[in-house]
């Protein structure tokens, strides 16, 4: 950003110039955001997966870079008036008038608020210098529709599939176009045959024009339209050395919801108007919060704004109190929730017990790592909030006592409000240990298998949870097991996986402490099973499916592949629940 600008000659000119400067700063950010996003097609065609990973991190870091640069620029322009609220209030009014006709103007407002919050260190919301209207519908100003391609049925569904795939070609050709067409049409026919009698005829398929890219896959996202009904329609494409193939077809809301999950990395899809796509996706995924859809489309800050809006609007309409979250008490984090709202709030304790050899700064860095890492569907996306306030009267006595005792450095009482200097907000899940106590035998067994798969999926993305206790994992409404306790998380490549040495004397095995040297990064996988608390049946279920996880050899094999630069991916669809065609 260029700081060498002429000083305005009057207050009105100052206000006008600063408002325009802020509009231009966001436009520059948005241009860079879209420039990074547009590389996704090239990365896919060139099979440049490492480049895709770098792009993902670069795009995430853009927002804070531009906010900080704009804060410095405004300090330079405003000089001694930089902390004058009356000046900023005037700038806000002029800014609002300038952006009114722009698409996704809410994004621009969020950027303005980020700049003022960083400038003033705002507690809660200051409506004079911020844009957060709790009663605002973020999609109300979206009066246009996303550009789609519509494919009506002209007799045979196979002809429809041929038209669709022909429109979505890449520099790399399809490996076998005719077979790909047949796969799509066969899957559609199979789905229709299983539908209720009134939903067995397709009128058209409507697909968003822009391709969605995520890591190594490209997705065609749309919906199937029938007479009085619609269903999601997603085709996953994979680019092999021999050409592009159809990898999977998703026609169930539950499967598509997992694709757009809060546990996955953000899509790279170049959109001129994001709100249009969010409205389209809501027709397919009505239970998915708007905040999560903005986030998974890469607009993390807007997703955070919408979550704040959803939360405080809900507070106005509810009466229940914040309470300690169900599950075992965390040693590093205090976790609480509002029973009627589907999120959990986490803040770092002032002090950790002796068994936790970690600092507050370490915890912050681990959450930062997760934010930028490939979450692979197994790490929850935690949104970071600073200087947020809640009515003290909405907190239970037990929770207030816990906050006063354990988080006095982070939480202050100001009048009738509690001010939280720092917290994370995540989607609420059922802790796995509680789930296993209450679930029917069959569902409990499935969750144990999912738990082992979660560990595997994390490992191949170079994440070792550190603490594998069941209480650190949660179960989503789709039955997926997700890891959410990051204070001991580390990279697999940083660990030293070892077998327990043979004891030289019988009394060695009777000692409370290890009879052999244990380094700081040493991990002994064969001991994992001793701490999980499975009953005999669930223990056998785990061993039958995932016994190799308990061997140092398996972990060292994963390490070797990661260190050699092999890209080990985790798909957002399960091969046993969706038809997959990667064996072409």
Image (cartoon, grey):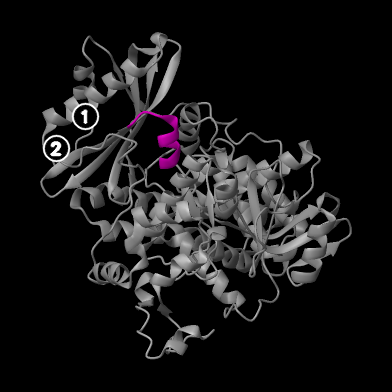
Residue 563 magenta: no
Tally of numbered discs: 2
Residue 258 magenta: yes
Q: CA distance from mark 1 to mark 2?
A: 9 Å
| Of pointers 1 and 2, the one earlier in the residue sequence | 1
Q: Is residue 437 above or below residue 248?
A: below
Q: Which residue is mark 2?
A: 174
Quadrant (top left, top right, bottom left, bottom right) of the C terminus: top left
Q: Measuring 56% from the left and 71% from the top, which residue is drawn there? A: 363
Q: Is residue 115 above or below residue 225?
A: below
Q: Residues within 10 Å of mark 1 (few under 14, many from 20)?
A: some
Chief secondary structure of the magenta span? helix
Q: Measuring 45% from the left and 26% from the top, which residue is drawn there? A: 145
User: Is residue 384 among what the camera can see?
Assistant: yes
Residue 169 location, quadrant: top left
- The magenta region covers 250-259
Q: Which mark, residue 269?
A: none
Out of 329 and 360, give the one closest to the viewer.
Answer: 329
Mark 1 vs 2: CB contact within 8 A: yes
Q: Which mark, residue 165?
A: 1
Residue 30 position in % (x across, y down): 45, 50
Residue 499 position in % (x across, y down): 34, 78
Looking at the image, residue 292 sits to the left or right of residue 150; the answer is right
Q: Measuring 35% from the left and 57% from the top, which residue is drawn there? A: 546
């Amino acid at each position: 950003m260029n700081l060498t600008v002429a000083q305005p000659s009057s207050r009105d000119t100052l206000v006008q110039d600063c408002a325009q400067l802020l509009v231009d700063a966001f436009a520059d950010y948005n241009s860079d955001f879209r420039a990074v996003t547009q590389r996704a097609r090239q990365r896919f065609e060139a099979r440049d997966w490492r480049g895709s990973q770098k792009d993902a991190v670069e795009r995430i870091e853009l927002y804070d870079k531009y906010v900080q640069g704009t804060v410095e620029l405004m300090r330079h322009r405003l000089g001694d008036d930089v902390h004058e609220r009356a000046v900023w209030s005037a700038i806000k009014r002029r800014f609002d008038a300038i952006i009114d006709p722009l698409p996704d103007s809410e994004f621009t407002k969020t950027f303005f608020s980020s700049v003022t919050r960083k400038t003033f260190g705002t507690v809660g919301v200051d409506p004079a210098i911020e844009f957060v209207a709790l009663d605002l519908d973020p999609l109300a100003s979206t009066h246009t529709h996303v550009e789609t391609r519509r494919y009506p049925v002209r007799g045979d569904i196979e002809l429809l599939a041929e038209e669709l795939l022909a429109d979505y070609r890449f520099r790399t050709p399809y490996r076998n176009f005719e077979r790909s067409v047949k796969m799509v049409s066969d899957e559609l026919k199979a789905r229709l045959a299983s539908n209720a009698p009134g939903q067995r005829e397709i009128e058209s398929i409507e697909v968003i024009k822009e391709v969605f890219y995520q890591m190594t896959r490209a997705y065609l996202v749309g919906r199937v339209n029938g007479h009085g009904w619609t269903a999601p329609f997603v085709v996953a494409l994979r680019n092999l050395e021999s050409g592009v193939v159809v990898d999977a077809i998703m026609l169930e809301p539950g499967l598509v919801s997992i694709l757009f999950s809060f546990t996955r990395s953000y899509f790279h899809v170049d959109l001129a108007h994001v709100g249009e796509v969010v409205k389209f996706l809501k027709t397919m995924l009505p239970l998915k919060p708007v905040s999560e859809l903005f986030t998974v489309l890469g607009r993390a800050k807007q997703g955070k704004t919408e979550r704040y809006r959803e939360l405080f609007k809900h507070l106005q309409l509810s009466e229940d109190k914040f309470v300690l979250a169900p599950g075992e008490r965390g040693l590093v984090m205090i976790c609480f929730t509002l029973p009627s709202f589907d999120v959990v709030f986490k803040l770092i304790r002032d002090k950790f017990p002796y068994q936790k050899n970690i600092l507050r700064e370490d915890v912050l860095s681990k959450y930062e790592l997760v934010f930028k890492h490939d979450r692979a569907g197994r790490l929850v996306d935690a949104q970071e909030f600073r200087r947020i306030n809640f009515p003290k009267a909405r907190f239970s006595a037990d929770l207030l006592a816990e906050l006063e005792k354990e988080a006095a450095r982070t939480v202050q009482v100001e009048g009738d409000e509690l001010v939280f200097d720092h917290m994370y907000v995540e989607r609420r899940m059922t802790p796995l240990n509680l789930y296993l106590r209450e679930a029917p035998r069959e569902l409990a067994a499935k969750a144990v298998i999912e738990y082992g798969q979660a560990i595997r999926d994390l490992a191949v993305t170079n994440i070792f949870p550190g603490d594998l206790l069941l209480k650190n994992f949660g179960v989503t409404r789709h039955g997926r097991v997700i890891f959410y306790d990051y204070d001991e998380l580390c990279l697999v490549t940083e660990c030293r996986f070892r077998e327990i040495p043979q004891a030289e004397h019988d009394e060695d095995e009777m000692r409370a402490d290890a009879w052999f040297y244990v380094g700081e990064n040493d991990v002994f996988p064969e001991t994992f099973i001793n701490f999980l608390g499975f009953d005999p049946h669930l223990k056998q279920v785990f061993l039958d499916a995932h016994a190799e996880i308990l061997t140092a050899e398996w972990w060292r094999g994963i390490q070797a592949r990661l260190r050699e630069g092999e890209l080990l991916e985790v798909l957002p669809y399960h091969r046993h629940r969706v038809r997959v065609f990667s064996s072409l």
